[in-house]
Image: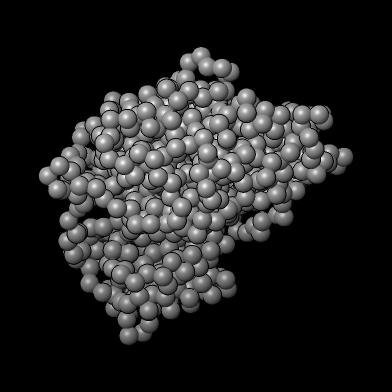
């Protein structure tokens, strides 16, 4: 059993872009498949062959040609956010990606962004690399008016707050590899103090230049074999990776009262520093143990109730044993053995540095939702410096059901996990997550009988067509869909833009068929009337659907059911265009342009309403 504390924080929305994963659904598929998402450094970053060599004897060489990379970092839907092309070109792509993810995260939560304007919504973003600034300065680009804001790390969070008109704290956090964990911890504290009502928290990491690849190779941090082998005997360093993730936080009591979707609950957390160690980047098992113990104490949970640890697990031969030593010290009073599994997303996606913590958090949330713990990729045998015998821990070699423990009275305990992130400068973070509390099934929706009105909109026809295609694909995979709730979610939980399609249907099959017709009609620019099957046409419903197409609010007409359950739907389909500085022709090591994304000529409306180093 679990009691709800006034300090509990619900996670009501999430969004991410990780190597080989455009969203958290693809991320989960990759985790379950124990897929390695590492590749050679693409030419869209730099030519790794130019830097390949022995970093200890050659100048500016790296023995790592690998990484985890996300696509189209040079592209951005600047029209959607009302940003001029020149401003967008001067913006660090970390700002652009987080803007797009913030919208997707709020949509996942069923929050209409305009409804939060002027409210105390906080934004906390972890960031560590600022390679776009380095590229601009290295190639001596003419200094633009917007370069100061475009490359300032504070603006990654501030731009989100500005766009949505949020009035809560807006902070970019840099504690290196624990940055996103510290951002989440700060957001949690802000909510507990009552200075914010909602908070976006997460982190981002992009790798656009070879500078840190070379530097980290010289310190011996990076894997010369191109794999992050967390806790494995063959561990030889980590692989650097890109990625970004955001979660939307809200006090649990408020989330329950508002009947919000809840991905999971933050029970507590802690942050500390290693103090003075052998070197600046050398970890301390004592400090790691302290931050884990303090997080569990703040969460008011015992080690015996924790059944999974999403470890930092960088895959360095000394760092991993030190982390296990810290965990064992934190769990030293536990009398049971082999009940708490250990894993690390780094074995799949590499080390996302500033975004490593949020990648681990989202992994745990997905595992809780599925009731499954993914296996640890690249694991063959335990690092000989690690001993797990007679300890609470075991390494997850394969996916397995996430078993629940019982308390002293025989009641099932909720699934609980700890997530660690340790910065290479010594700042450690740990949070305790718990699965969402059980809730009664929602009552059947009231009012509005079949057929139902399903509304879809976007800022451009190109986006609208992709949006409809994504919805059709999503619908095709649904087996327990309640049409009334889909109708209510699309109308009440989405922003309504100027390019609109409305479908009338009384069955999932009819909805799919009419959506297919709508997709074809948008391509031909002939979509000014509701799509329906003749036998499903009901005059009142048809008239109200036609009015919505003209921009009329139809909520008061009893044609939209009462909303009793939130559904996570496919997010908005942005229409990205290339936004990058003009590269110098003689430069052979800068980020090269990727193929230009297709752009629509349709006018876009502005948004409505506005070994010696084992660290990090």
In the rendered image, which quarter is residue 164 located in?
top left
| 204 left or right, relative to 388 | right
Residue 101 drawn above or below residue 299: below
Depth check: give the residue in front, 414 or 137: 414
Write the residue at 12% across / 44% down.
409
Task: Describe the colour scheme in one phrase.
Answer: one colour
Q: Is residue 117 visible?
A: no
Residue 483, percent across and down? Answer: 30, 69
Residue 471 drawn above or below residue 27: below
Residue 240, percent across and down? Answer: 62, 40
Q: Is residue 438 visible?
A: yes
Residue 18 drawn above or below residue 131: below
Residue 475, percent across and down? Answer: 41, 69
Write the residue at 28% across / 34% down.
334
Depth check: give the residue in front, 132 or 403: 403
In the displayed orientation, state which residue is furthest to the right.
Answer: 586
Depth check: give the residue in front, 13 or 282: 282
Residue 549 drawn above or below residue 28: below
């Amino acid at each position: 059993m679990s009691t709800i504390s006034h300090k509990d924080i619900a996670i009501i929305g999430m969004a991410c872009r990780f190597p080989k994963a455009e969203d958290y659904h693809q991320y989960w598929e990759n985790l379950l498949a124990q897929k390695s998402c590492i590749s050679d450094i693409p030419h869209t970053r730099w030519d790794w062959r130019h830097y390949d060599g022995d970093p200890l004897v050659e100048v500016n060489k790296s023995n790592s040609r690998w990484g985890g990379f996300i696509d189209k970092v040079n592209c951005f839907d600047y029209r959607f956010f009302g940003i001029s092309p020149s401003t967008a070109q001067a913006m660090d792509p970390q700002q652009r990606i987080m803007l797009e993810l913030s919208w997707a995260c709020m949509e996942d939560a069923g929050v209409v962004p305009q409804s939060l304007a002027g409210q105390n919504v906080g934004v906390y973003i972890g960031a560590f690399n600022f390679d776009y600034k380095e590229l601009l300065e290295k190639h001596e680009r003419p200094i633009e008016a917007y370069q100061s804001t475009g490359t300032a790390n504070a603006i990654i969070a501030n731009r989100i707050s500005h766009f949505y008109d949020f009035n809560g704290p807006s902070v970019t956090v840099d504690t290196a590899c624990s940055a996103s964990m510290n951002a989440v911890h700060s957001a949690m504290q802000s909510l507990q103090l009552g200075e914010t009502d909602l908070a976006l928290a997460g982190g981002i990491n992009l790798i656009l230049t070879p500078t840190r690849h070379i530097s980290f190779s010289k310190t011996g941090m990076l894997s010369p074999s191109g794999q992050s082998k967390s806790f494995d005997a063959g561990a030889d360093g980590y692989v650097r990776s890109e990625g970004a993730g955001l979660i939307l936080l809200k006090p649990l009591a408020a989330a329950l009262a508002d009947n919000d979707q809840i991905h999971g609950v933050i029970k507590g957390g802690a942050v500390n520093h290693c103090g003075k160690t052998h070197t600046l980047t050398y970890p301390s098992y004592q400090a790691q143990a302290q931050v884990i113990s303090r997080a569990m104490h703040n969460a008011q949970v015992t080690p015996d109730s924790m059944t999974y640890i999403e470890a930092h697990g960088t895959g360095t031969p000394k760092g991993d044993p030190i982390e296990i030593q810290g965990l064992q010290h934190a769990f030293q009073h536990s009398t049971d053995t082999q009940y708490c599994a250990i894993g690390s997303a780094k074995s799949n996606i590499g080390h996302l540095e500033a975004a490593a913590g949020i990648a681990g958090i989202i992994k745990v949330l997905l595992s809780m939702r599925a009731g499954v713990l993914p296996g640890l990729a690249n694991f063959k045998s335990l690092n000989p410096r690690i001993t797990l015998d007679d300890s609470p821990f075991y390494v997850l070699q394969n996916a397995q059901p996430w078993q629940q423990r019982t308390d002293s009275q025989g009641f099932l305990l909720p699934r609980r996990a700890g997530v660690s992130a340790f910065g290479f400068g010594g700042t450690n973070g740990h949070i305790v997550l718990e699965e969402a509390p059980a809730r009664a099934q929602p009552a059947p929706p009231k009012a509005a009988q079949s057929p139902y009105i399903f509304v879809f909109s976007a800022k451009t026809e190109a986006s609208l067509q992709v949006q409809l295609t994504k919805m059709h694909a999503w619908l095709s995979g649904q087996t327990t869909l309640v049409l009334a709730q889909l109708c209510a979610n699309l109308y009440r939980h989405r922003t309504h833009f100027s390019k609109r399609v409305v479908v009338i249907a009384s069955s999932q099959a009819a909805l799919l068929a009419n959506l297919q017709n709508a997709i074809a009609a948008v391509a031909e620019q002939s979509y000014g009337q509701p799509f329906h099957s003749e036998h499903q046409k009901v005059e009142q419903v048809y008239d109200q659907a036609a009015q919505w197409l003209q921009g009329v609010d139809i909520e008061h007409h009893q044609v939209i059911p009462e909303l009793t359950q939130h559904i996570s739907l496919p997010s908005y389909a942005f229409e990205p265009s290339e936004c990058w500085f003009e590269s110098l022709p003689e430069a052979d090591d800068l980020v090269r342009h990727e193929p230009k994304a297709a752009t629509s000529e349709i006018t876009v409306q502005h948004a409505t309403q506005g070994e010696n180093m084992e660290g990090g």
